[in-house]
Amino acid sequence: MGYDLNDTNELIKEANKSILFTTVRPNIVMERGEGMYLRDTEGKSYIDFIGGWAVTALGHCPRVLKEALINQGNTLINASPSFYNRPMIEFAKLLTDKSCFDRVFFANSGSEANEGAIKLARKYGAKFFNGAYEIITNINSFHGRTLAAMSATGKAAWDKLYEPKVPGFKHVPINDLEAIKTSITSNTCAVMLEPIQGEGGVYELSKDYVKAVSEICKKHGILLIFDEVQTGLGRTGSLFAYEYYEIEPDIMTLAKGIGGGYPLSALLVKEEFNIFEPGDQGGSYSAQPLGMAVGKAVVSEIINQNLSYNAKVQGEYIVEKLNEIKDKYELTNIRGRGLLIAFDLPEDKGSEVAAGCLSEGLLLNSPRPNIIRIMPPLIVTQKDTDDMISILCKVLDRVLL
Ligand SMILES: *Cc1c(COP(=O)(O)O)cnc(C)c1O
C-alpha cells in the first residue's frame, strides 16, 4: 500500500481521501471501548457522556451484547425476512409484554422506524379517513434523515434542503395546544410527538400538553405517534417516556438504545392499527436473527438490571452537581429527565467547550451553539459523574472565566 495504517496520521490522511465528507471529525481514530470509556489509536482514553449519541445504553462492548453476537453468529445470521426466526419471536414478545403495544415491526434505524410509522398513518388515513394524509409534528423536533423523516422534522436549518420535501407535514410549536387544535383538518391522519426533543437541545413536552393532545387525537379519531427513538428504553427514568405522561400512544418508534450500539429499530402498534397488508412494508434486514438476539439481550439487561431506575437516580445526581457549579459559570436552564440532560452556556461557546472536553478526555455534545447536552450510557455511576464534572470545570475555567 505504500503507507503504514498503524500510524494515526496516515490513517487520518487516508480518511480524508476516501471517506465521503458529511461531517467535521476531529483528528482521532477510535479503536476500543469498554464500559464508560473509549480509547483511540494513540492509547488516549475518553470518558463517554455522549454514549454513541444515546445509543450505547449498556456502555461499550457489554458482555451480554458480545455473547448474543457470538452465540447467534454461530447459529443463524439471516434466513431472509420471509421466514419467522426464534429470536424475532422472543424479542417481539418481550417488547409487547413490557409496553402497551401489541405488535412490532423491526427495522434498522430510527429514521426507518419513523418511515414505517408515517406509512402506517397514511394507510390508516387512506383506509378510514377518505385519504387523509397530513401529520402534525413539532417545531424543533427531530425524526431522522430519510426524506419523509426529514420532512417530519421541525428543524429550521433543513427548510431549504433537498427540496421538494415529502408533502403533508405541518409543524407547530411545542406545548401550544391551540396550535394543534387549529392545525387539525379533515385531511389530518396523525400527530407525531418527540416527548423530549433530544437533538433539538433537550426541551420537554409538558404533561398537560401531551395529555390534552392525546384527548384531542382520540376525539378526532386520529393517531398519536410517539417517537421514542431517543427517550425510550430507560433513558428518561422510566422504560418508556409515555409512562411519565400517563397516556398510551397508538404507535411508538424505538431505536438508539434498543441495540446498545448495534443498528436496530422497532415500530410498535396497538392491535387495532395492525393494518398493513402483505407488500406494504418490509426490508431485507427486517427482524434478522442476529439483530433480534442482540436487541433481546440488550433490552432484557436494561429491564433486569433496572437501568431505568439508575437513569433516574444518576440523572438527578448529574443535575445536582450541575446546580453546584452553575453560579460560578453562569450556567442556566439545567433541564431534562433521567439521563437526557442539557444546560445553557452564558455565551455561544458550546463547540469550544466540547472541543476542550475532548482534549481533556471527556465526550460531551453541543447540539446548539449555547447548549451542552449530556446523555451517558445508562450504567453511569456517581464516580463517573464526579470525574465528568471535574473535567468540565477545568474546561469552563479556561473557556468562560
Ligand atoms: C436519532 C433520532 C432519530 C433518527 O434515528 P436514526 O437511527 O439516526 O435514523 C429519530 N428520532 C429521534 C427522536 C432521534 O433522536
Image (cartoon, rainbow, N blue to C red):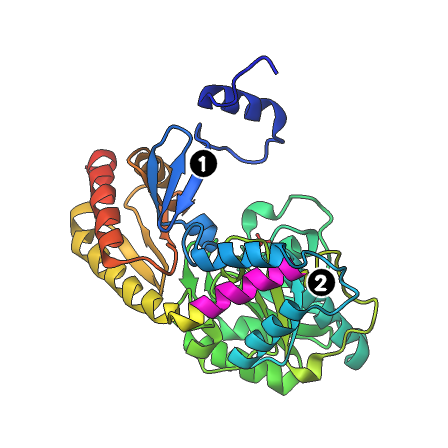
Q: Which mark is in front, 1 or 2?
A: 1
Of mark 1 and mark 2, the one earlier in the sequence is: 1
Q: Which residue is mark 2?
A: 168
- Against 213, is 319 above or below? above
Q: Residues within 10 Å of mark 2 (few under 14, many from 20)?
A: some
- Residue 28 horizontal side relative to residue 99, left or right: left
Label 1: state its secondary structure. Answer: strand
Q: Are marks 1 and 2 in contact (CB under 8 Å)?
A: no
The image shows residue 66 at horizontal and vertical percentages of 50, 54
Furthest residue toward right: 279
Numbered label attached to residue 30: 1
Question: Which quadrant, please, contains the N terminus?
Answer: top right
Q: How many marks?
A: 2
- Where in the image, quadrant-wise, is ligand 1 located? bottom right
Residue 183 visible: no
**The residue stretch that appears in magenta:** 289-301
Q: Residue 305 is drawn in which quadrant?
A: bottom left
